[in-house]
Image: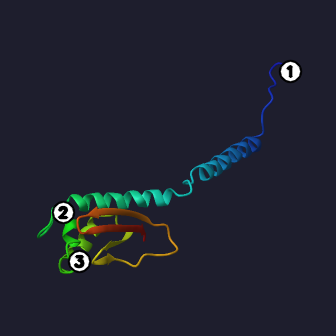
Amino acid sequence: MAEGDRGQLSLTLVEAGIGVLLLFAATATFALGLPAVGADEAQLDAYAEDAGTVLSREPPRHEGLTRLSEVTRSGSAFERERAALAHRVERILPGNLMYRVVTPHGAVGFPRPTDAPTGRATVPTVGGRVTIWVWYA
């Protein structure tokens, strides 16, 4: 080889190498970017806990210590507050979630699925326990 001659890689070989690196990067992103098993349930539990915390600290609309103690006070109080409770839960939770709130006197929300990940929080009140279930719509 003469002094001015240099070895060059073929442009096709360079392009193939870059393509392999991009394919590897995309595969690694998908493989490593998947959430851990149970991550959905943990996030849903957090949403349910947050909703329970908000509801347990809100003042009642009519009587009781909090909004939740009001709906657990009696069957008639639950019936009176049913629509307001449902509306408030819908405003608290993100739009991509469905819910069911179960009190000693009744429930509001949607039927709970048996084949989807759900989150749950239980809030004790003077009138009994309130359970909040959430899941992705």
Q: Is residue 101 left or right of residue 127?
A: right
Name which residue type carries label 1: Ala
Name which residue type carries label 2: Thr
The residue that appears at 33% across and 76% down in the rendered structure is: 109
Residue 28, image x and y in percent? 64, 48
Q: Is residue 96 visible?
A: no
The residue that appears at 20% across and 72% down in the rendered structure is: 73
Q: Residue furthest right?
A: 1
Residue 34, image x and y in percent? 57, 54
Q: Residues within 10 Å of mark 3 (few under 14, many from 20)?
A: some
Q: Is residue 49 visible?
A: yes
Please state which of residues 128 and 100 is positioned toward the viewer in this rendering.
Answer: 128
The C terminus: image quadrant? bottom left
Name which residue type carries label 3: Arg
Q: Find numbered disc 2 in the image and state the secondary structure of the residue it sits on.
A: loop
Q: Find numbered disc 3 in the image and state the secondary structure of the residue it sits on.
A: helix
Residue 106 vs 28, above or below: the answer is: below
Viewer-nearest of discs 1 and 3: 3
Numbered badge on residue 130:
none
User: Sequence order check: which comes first, mark 2 or mark 1?
Assistant: 1
Mark 2 and mark 1: Cα distance apart in space: 90 Å
Mark 1 and mark 3: Cα distance apart in space: 91 Å
Q: Find numbered disc 1 in the image and state the secondary structure of the residue it sits on.
A: loop
What residue would you read off at disc 2?
Answer: 66
Please state which of residues 26 and 107 is positioned toward the viewer in this rendering.
Answer: 107
Numbered badge on residue 82:
3
Quadrant of residue 59 within the rendered picture: bottom left
User: Sequence order check: which comes first, mark 3 or mark 2?
Assistant: 2
Viewer-nearest of discs 2 and 1: 2
Q: Residue furthest left?
A: 62
Numbered badge on residue 2:
1
